[in-house]
Image: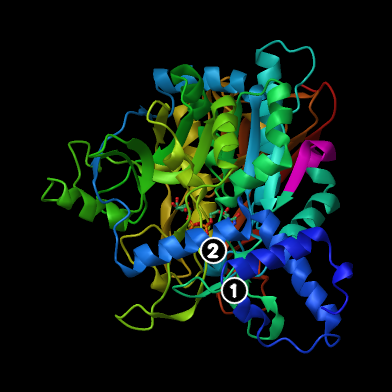
Amino acid sequence: VKNLHLLSPDQIQSGKVLLEMGQSHLFQHWAEPGVDDDQKKAFFTQLSKLNSSYPGGLASYIKTARELLADSKAGKNPYDGFTPSVPIGEVLSLGDDNFIKFEDVGVKEAKNAAFVLVAGGLGERLGYNGIKVALPAETTTGTCFLQLYIESVLALQEASSRLTQGTCQKEIPFVIMTSDDTHTCTLDLLESNSYFGMKASQVKLLKQEKVACLDDNDARLALDPHNKYKIQTKPHGHGDVHSLLYSSGLLNVWHDSRLRWVIFFQDTNGLLFKAIPASLGVSATKEYHVNSLAVPRKAKEAIGGIAKLTHSDGRSMVINVEYNQLDPLLRATGHPDGDVNCETGYSPFPGNINQLILELDPYIKELTKTGGAVKDFVNPKYKDASKTSFKSSTRLECMMQDYPKTLPPSARVGFTVIDTWLAYAPVKNNSEAANIPKQNPYHSATSGEMAIYRANSLILKKAGVQVEDPVQQVFNNQEVEVWPRVTWKPKWGITFAEIQSKVGGGCFISQKSTMALKGRHIFLENLTLDGTLIINSSDDAKVKVGGSIKNKGWLIERIDYKDITFPEELRIRGFKIEKKEQLEKTYGNFCY
Ligand code: UGB
């Protein structure tokens, strides 16, 4: 750049770092001084952003990359010297005494929690063009994931304050990690829906930045193929959430307002909040620094297993081990059959669903040491067995569940296993279910929606309602159970105990029925439903619903995935809801 004085000290410093770290190739094709100065300045702007957004800066990024690329070339196993064993955790089942006890503790603790949604991923696998949190979790009410999450946090906030006799509600902070791919759309979604009822000041968006791509084993940074004044970048992964929270200063703000928990969750799991109160109760009761939510996992099933790893040198950690690494690790450490089911019919290593509850104070302490960095990994696609060159540029990546890797062995790291049907139904895969191996769950928009109806039906059953059995149907090549389409606002029942208190005897719901409860104080008693019932009620209204209701209802009609006359969010499900007839009632204040 001809006029060096136009660069900030920060930018000049970042340039020096590049030269010291053997990256002079980046400048080799630059035009002579005075030419392309605007683009050169843009290069330095990008550089200082890359430098400031990685813990330890670009020098640390390049150094780590060289080490990890060398390990990868040498075929080094990251788990060498470690022996896996089953860690200690809690296994819960909806409605059991233990579940109810932990839920009661958890819902009271919720007012001391902050929620963090990682939503920087675009979801290429899903084949959906918009942001995933804008997708309807179910199409009976059309509630999108973000609305569901916000209303769930608000319901927890209200219940928590009420149960602890708080005079005023403590506002639960809600953070969303976005990326360049999702930030604007997420903000638009929030603003155009008045933050779904949450105060705008309660919601904070933290945008993650991409990281520099690497061209070879020497960690030479890659240039953008279309712009010689730009470093090519790619996403770094959801592990960024820790450094972003740390650098935002929010953790100290939360500490000062006496919060105790940070709860991390992913973008498309419509069941998650059914598991949160009980799991938080486990964290509080067992004083876990880290609590990973998990589901029973069949041996060798394609989700990571939570394991305790003990090294021959005495180190140990409780961590998610990817399924393709767990089985060989067990075989190499005295378990010739590898990962096998135990007497429960499941692997003793529970399946990680990547929802974490961290205790705030130890979390702050740890991040102060690490600067928020979690262990990176690299996954280059080599051209050939010599492992000397890559098919395309690679980059460092990190995962939020790797946070415990740097913790001392004294840290209390546990897990909470909750039934899959109650806790886990992510929407990740596209509708061409033919591509999903038969033994794996679909994890599609079709299965995610059906899982919500199933869970709600099973919860009502447990609460004493007679719910007719589901039928099997095929949508987009996927065979799913279709239960009555039961939905409710989170404020109707955020815990099992609350739901139970709103369900009296003598209720029956047929399989063809749809029921949407959109209000707080709605009591079901002696209700026979064979059709569609929608109840809207204001928070002050107390509504008792009963009697026999029969109408043509709402039907589920199969649609063709390829039929572009339907919107994408319906096509990825393979069905739409045909509203034939319903009973819809709206109650204002003080009705009964
Ligand atoms: N995400 C970000 O916010 N930023 C990023 O850079 C990338 C992702 P995916 P993944 O639930 O079964 C995870 O793509 O990473 C957000 C666990 O690592 O849906 O393949 C993104 O928006 C894995 O151990 O999942 O796998 C989304 O909310 C397993 O538990 C979240 O991160 C798996 O999820 C996850 O991103 C699972």
Q: Residue at x 51, y 55 (%)?
A: 398
Nearest the viewer among 312 and 242 is 312
Q: Is residue 428 visible?
A: no
Q: Are the residues tagged 1 and 2 within 8 Å (C-beta)?
A: yes
The stretch drawn in magenta includes residue 204: yes
Q: Which residues are magenta?
A: 196-205
Of the numbered discs 1 and 2, the one sitting upstream in the chain is 1
Foreground: 229 or 459?
229
Q: Where's residue 444, x and y in %?
A: 50, 61
The image quarter in which residue 302 lies: bottom left
In the image, taking residue 288 as reference, residue 26 lies left or right, namely right
Q: Relative to residue 58, is residue 280 drawn left or right?
A: left
According to the picture, the residue beneath numbered tag 2 turns out to be 62
Q: Give the vertical position of 469 relative to 474 (above or below).
A: above
Query: In which quadrant will I find the C terminus?
Result: top right
Residue at x 56%, y 53% (from the top left corner): 238
| Residue 27 vertical position relative to residue 306 in the rendered view, above or below | below
Residue 318 seen: yes
Q: Position of residue 292 (x, y in %)?
A: 45, 37
Badge 1 crowding class, 10 Å Cα cut-off, few under 14, some 14 to 19, many 20 or more, is: some
Name the spot of residue 589 as percent of width and height, x first: 85, 25
Q: Secondary structure at mark 1?
A: loop
User: Disc 1 and disc 2: Cα gap in Å?
Assistant: 10 Å
